[in-house]
Amino acid sequence: MNGIYTSAEGARAVERSCRALLERWPVPAEHLRVPTRQGETFVVACGPRDAPPVLLLHGSGASSAMWMEDVAAWSRHLRLYAVDTIGEPGLSAPSRPALDSDAHALWLDDVLAALAVRRVSIVGTSLGGRLAVDYATRRPGRVARLALLCPSGIGGQKYGVLLLALLLMPFGRWGRDRTMRLVLGPAASSASPAPDASSASAAAAASSASSASPEPPPPSAEPMRAYGEHVMLVHEHFRPRRERIPVFDDDTLRRLSMPVLVTVGGRDALLDSHETRRRLEAAVPHATVRLLPDAGHLLRGQTLPILDFLSSREEGPAVRESR
C-alpha cells in the first residue's frame, strides 16, 4: 500500500485514523471485505437487508467515512453499501487501473457479485461520480438510479487554484488547510479543519422535512472535528492521482437511460459546473441538474434531496429543494 502514500508510517497512520473514524459510524453496520480482480475491497453495509440497495462511491482523497453524516437518514429506508474505492486512502487495495478503461466497471461487477446485488442505485461524488457514470453507461440495466455530486469527467477541469495550491502546500498544516479551503469553496469555512476535497458530506439538513423522511439532527462538533483531523492527515501522507480525468463524450452520456439527479456548485474551483449542467441537460433524457450558485466543490445540505430522489418511484427525478 506504500505506493499511494509518502511513507510506510504515513500509510499506517492513515489506516489507524480510518479505523478510528469507522468506530463513530452512527448506525449499526457490518464491515465486509470482498475479493475482486483488483484486490480486496472494504465495504461498510448498513440499513435493512430487504430495502432497496444503494452503492456509495466517495471522491479522491477520501474513504467510506465521508458518508457518516448521511447514513443515519438514508439507512432508515435503504440498504447502503459504502465502498472504499481502490487506490484511495481507505481500507481497500492500492490498485489504480486506468480511468479510461473498463477496469473499474469490472471491479464494481466483482463488488456487487460478492454482495449478491443484481441491480443497484449509486450515489457518487467527484471522482466517485465519474466511476458511477462509467459504470452506469457500461451496465445501464444494472443501475436503477444515479445521484451525482460535483461529478468529474463531464465538465472541464480547472487548474488555476491547483497551481496556487502547489505554492501553499509547502507551508505545513497552515498551507494544507488554506489549500483545502480554496479548493472546496465557501462550505469549507463552516468546519475546521475542512472536510475532504472530493466529498459532498451532508452536514446540514434540508429545511423542509416530512414525516416520511424527517430532518436528521445536525452533526455534533466532535465527529466533524475528528473527520477534519483525518482529512488533514490524509493530505499530509497520501499521493493523489496526477493524471487528467478523462471526459465522457456525448454518445457515452446518452447511454444514461435511468433517472439521474446531479447537484453541482456554481463556484466549484475544480470543475466547470456550468459545462457539466449544459452537457447533461442536452444528452441525458431523464436528468435533473441542480446548480447551487454560491456553492463550491464541497456541497452541504443534500441528505434529504438525495433521499427523496432515491426513494421516488417516478420514472423521472423528483427531489426536494434544499436551502
Image: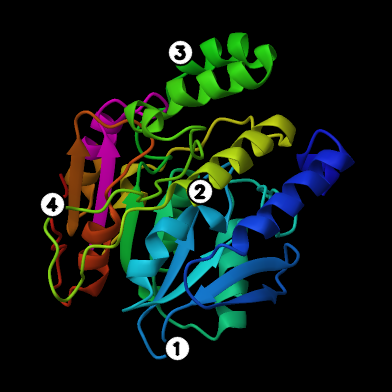
Question: Tag 2: Cα neighbours inside 10 Å, few (<14), some, or many (≥20)?
Answer: few
Label 4 sits on residue? 321
Q: Is residue 274 magenta?
A: yes
**Could you tell me which residue is drawn at 74 percent across and 67 percent down?**
40
**Could you tell me which residue is drawn at 40 percent across and 31 percent down?**
188
Question: What's under tag 4, amino acid-wise?
Answer: Glu
Label 1 sits on residue? 49
Question: Tag 3: Cα neighbours inside 10 Å, few (<14), some, or many (≥20)?
Answer: few
Q: Quadrant of residue 78?
A: bottom left
Per the model, the C-alpha gap separating discs 1 and 4 is: 29 Å
Question: What's under tag 2, amino acid-wise?
Answer: Glu
Residue 317, image x and y in percent? 16, 62
Tell me if 142 is positioned left or right of 60 in this view: left
Query: Among all residues in the image, which is located at the extreme right?
Result: 8
Nearer to us in this view, 107 or 5: 5
Per the model, the C-alpha gap separating discs 2 and 3 is: 34 Å
> Magenta residues?
259-278
Nearer to us in this view, 79 or 281: 79
Q: Name which of mark 1 and mark 4 comes first in the sequence.
A: 1
Question: Tag 4: Cα neighbours inside 10 Å, few (<14), some, or many (≥20)?
Answer: some
Residue 255 shows in this picture: no
- Element carrying mark 2: helix
Residue 179, image x and y in percent? 53, 20
Tell me if 230 is positioned left or right of 70 in this view: right
Question: What's under tag 1, amino acid-wise?
Answer: Arg
Question: Is residue 180 depicted above or below 21 in this figure?
Answer: above
Per the model, the C-alpha gap separating discs 1 and 3 is: 45 Å
Q: Is residue 31 magenta?
A: no
Residue 160, which numbered label?
Answer: 3
